[in-house]
Image (cartoon, rainbow, N blue to C red):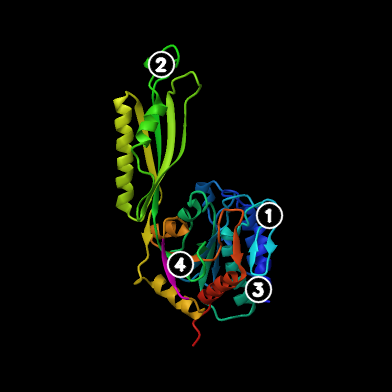
Amino acid sequence: MKQKRLLEILLSLIKIEALSQHEKPVADHILDFLHALNLKPYFDKSSIQTGSDTGNLICKVGNGGDFMLLAHMDTAQPTVGVNPQILADRITSDGTTVLGIDNRVGIAVILFALEKVLLEKNVIKDFTVCFTTCEESTLAGSLNLEIADHIKKCFIFDSSLRPGAFIYSSCGAKKFTVTIKGLASHSGLAPEKGINSIAIAACALSQIRQGRIGDKTTVNIGTISGGSAVNVVPEKTLLTGEVRSAELGMVDEVIAGIKTIFLKESATRGAGLDFKDEWDFKPYNVTPESEIYKDILTVMGKVGLTPVPVASLAGSDANSLNGRGIQAINLGIGAQNPHANDEFILKADLIKISEIALELMQKQRS
């Protein structure tokens, strides 16, 4: 019976299309679910900053407590036409679309656990549940989430790791944009009068290490575009990239080195350069001495899991919240192969992560 109801909630969510900045259909579905439990959910005003068609959805249970359970409402890829396949041991798509389990699983287990404890009139703690926007694109929802002063901790249901694993440490990421300003000229009649911005970009890129450049640091040039016509020396070239590292100072150090290379190559050939960089999200590290770390170890033990702390090179809402002074960890929910058409979740993992949500909500039993 537990598995059946949990599947019902998950499948109803999977069928709703909601990309970043278009989360309202999922938000309205959750709103109706919470109203049916006689709760009083509300939206914050984050849409002004995020550009989403809805704010983050927040609901206090009791007086709201000192901790949150959180999942995001957007998917990275469209789920239009999704056709879930319920197999013996797992739920997957038919291979033509993503399944959307990132992060509909997170939403489903929170809603399932909340419904169960309230309908069964279990003795529960005071806490807050939150459903955020724009996680897959910018983390803007959690960056602008309206958080009550009494909230100190947040358990995020979003990692593709299997239940038992949790992300206690994550990298930061800084994106950069490079605009090389050369000089246009006819490539046949007067190529020597032009300044080839693409050639400058190529020379600079040949000197920049990319991929994994250390145990905790990666560099990627993600896009490049330039030129206007095949017979014109390309006047302008635009590149975008990112640097990720678990070490705050390393990000700035690597960015500075990349900037120096582009400045040198542009100046040598008489081109102009515009280099901009900004943080997407900053790294965090939740120590074993912290309250939330100890809490999750206790919960894992109660549901029969061996805790597996993991350091990650991916960002999540946990980066935003830790950056805002809220202790936050990202829990493995077993949403495997996220963002791909072969996404799936094992039924056993779905049940186990719901047990974690239930344990977090219920008061300690003597």
Disc 4 secondary structure class = strand
Q: Is residue 337 above or below residue 227?
A: below
Residue 341 seen in the current view:
yes
Q: Are marks 1 and 3 in contact (CB under 8 Å)?
A: no
Please identify the residue farthest to the bottom as the structure is shown. Answer: 366
Under mark 4, the amino acid is Phe
Q: Residues within 10 Å of mark 1 (few under 14, many from 20)?
A: many
The image shows residue 297 at horizontal and vertical percentages of 43, 75
What residue would you read off at disc 2?
Answer: 191
Task: Name the one closer to the observer, 298 or 305.
Answer: 305
Name which of mark 1 and mark 2 comes first in the sequence: 1
Under mark 1, the amino acid is Val
**Residue at 47% from the left image edge and 68% from the top image edge:** 165
Q: Which residues are magenta?
A: 306-311
Q: Per the image, is 229 magenta? A: no
Cα gap from disc 4 to disc 2, whole angstroms: 57 Å
Q: Residues within 10 Å of mark 4 (few under 14, many from 20)?
A: many
Q: Is residue 298 left or right of residue 287?
A: right
The image shows residue 307 at horizontal and vertical percentages of 44, 73
Name which of mark 4 and mark 3 comes first in the sequence: 3
Q: Is residue 311 above or below residue 226?
A: below
Q: Is residue 241 left or right of residue 88?
A: left
What residue would you read off at disc 4?
Answer: 166
- Residue 82 is labelled as 1
Under mark 2, the amino acid is Pro
Depth check, mark 4 against mark 2: the one in front is 2
Disc 1 secondary structure class = loop
Q: Is residue 104 left or right of residue 291?
A: right
What residue would you read off at disc 3?
Answer: 3
